[in-house]
Image (cartoon, rainbow, N blue to C red):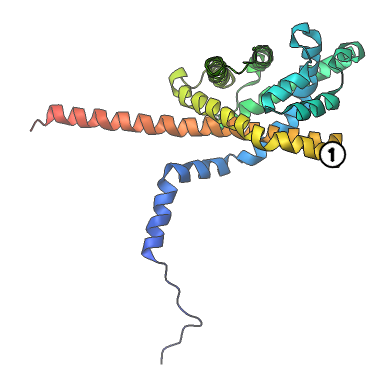
């Protein structure tokens, strides 16, 4: 007498298995798995927290020391978000008058901001190392964080001092193209610098291109979503509502920075694989002519 099964036997559809394997091996599946392994959202939220806690006060001081920056850090943030006039006013009310920042900042405060700013650079470096599966850099590479932070501040100053186009389509296209090229150059150099030269310049090009395009997409998204949210949240929650929107935008920037580098690595690997396959076919054709 045979024992009866305790429950109905479950069989997996072979088509579903093939579909699952195909998705796992596809670029989307590879990107999803690698993003999960490197904890992309966790790192993006850490990026936002460090950015708001350390980078924002540092940039307010730089804006106060730079007369050419006009309205200071509030103008920087408004230009990056692409907000409307009403939302720009809320951002300016949140950050107050940056011109008083230098007068009220102590030497200890400046030292703390410098240390925290270098910590921000270290966090970005760790994210890039996770993208490329590289070991943590040694302590003597900390000077690269100083150079990267200076490069970031210089890029933001150049960005905010770019003249805004006036109802001129050709000029608008030129300015947008200039911003795109500048963003590409910044992230291309950032990856090379923070990865301590362990990845070739050529291999970093796809990541810089995708990051620049993602940043452009984030800016368009900000104009449609974050700009109205700033105005509405300011009425509902006061200044705290503006802080929430800016913090959410910084999380988006963190996702763009790390996801852009990750997608760039996948593109580089795919291009390298195709190039090697072509070389193998050509080599085989030379040794075994038809």
Q: Position of residue 116 (x, y in %)?
A: 77, 23
Q: Residue, x 52% and y 41% (percent of image)?
A: 34
The answer to which image quadrant residue 266 occupies is top left
Q: Position of residue 145 (x, y in %)?
A: 66, 17
Q: Position of residue 229 (x, y in %)?
A: 74, 38
Query: Does the rendering let one see residue 274?
Result: yes
- Mark 1, other Cα within 10 Å: few <14 / some 14–19 / many ≥20: few
Residue nearer the viewer, 129 or 272: 272
Placement of 59 over or under 271, stated as above or below: above
Quarter in which the C terminus is drawn: top left
Q: Image check: 189 left or right of 115?
A: left
Q: Which residue is mark 1?
A: 235
Placement of 216 over or under 60, stated as above or below: below
Label 1 sits on a secondary structure element that is helix
Query: Does the rendering let one see residue 119?
Result: no
Q: Residue, x 77% and y 26% (percent of image)?
A: 88
Residue at the far front in the pictured view = 167
Residue nearer the viewer, 15 or 237: 237
The answer to which image quadrant residue 135 occupies is top right
């Amino acid at each position: 007498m045979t024992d009866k099964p305790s429950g109905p036997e479950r069989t997996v559809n072979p088509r579903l298995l093939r579909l699952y394997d195909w998705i796992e091996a596809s670029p989307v599946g590879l990107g999803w798995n690698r993003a999960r392994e490197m904890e992309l959202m966790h790192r993006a939220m850490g990026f936002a927290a460090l950015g708001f806690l350390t980078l924002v006060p540092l940039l307010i001081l730089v804006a106060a020391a730079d007369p050419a920056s006009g309205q200071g850090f509030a103008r920087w943030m408004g230009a990056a978000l692409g907000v409307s006039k009403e939302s720009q006013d809320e951002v300016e009310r949140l950050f107050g008058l940056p011109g008083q920042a230098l007068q009220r900042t102590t030497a200890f405060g400046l030292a703390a901001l410098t240390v925290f700013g270098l910590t921000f650079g270290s966090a970005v470096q760790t994210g890039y190392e996770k993208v490329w599966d590289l070991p943590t850099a040694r302590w003597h590479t900390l000077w690269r964080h100083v150079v990267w932070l200076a490069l970031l501040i210089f890029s933001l100053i150049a960005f905010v001092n770019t003249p805004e186009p006036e109802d001129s389509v050709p000029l608008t296209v030129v300015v947008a193209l200039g911003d795109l090229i500048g963003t590409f150059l910044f992230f291309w150099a950032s990856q090379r610098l923070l990865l301590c030269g362990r990845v070739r310049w050529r291999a970093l090009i796809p990541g810089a291109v995708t990051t620049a395009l993602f940043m452009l997409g984030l800016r368009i998204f900000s104009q449609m979503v974050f700009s109205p949210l700033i105005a509405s949240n300011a009425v509902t929650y006061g200044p705290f509502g503006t802080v929430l929107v800016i913090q959410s935008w910084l999380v988006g920037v963190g996702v763009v920075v790390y996801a852009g580098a990750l997608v760039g690595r996948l593109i580089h690997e795919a291009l390298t694989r195709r190039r090697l396959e072509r070389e193998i076919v050509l080599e085989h054709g030379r040794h075994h002519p038809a």
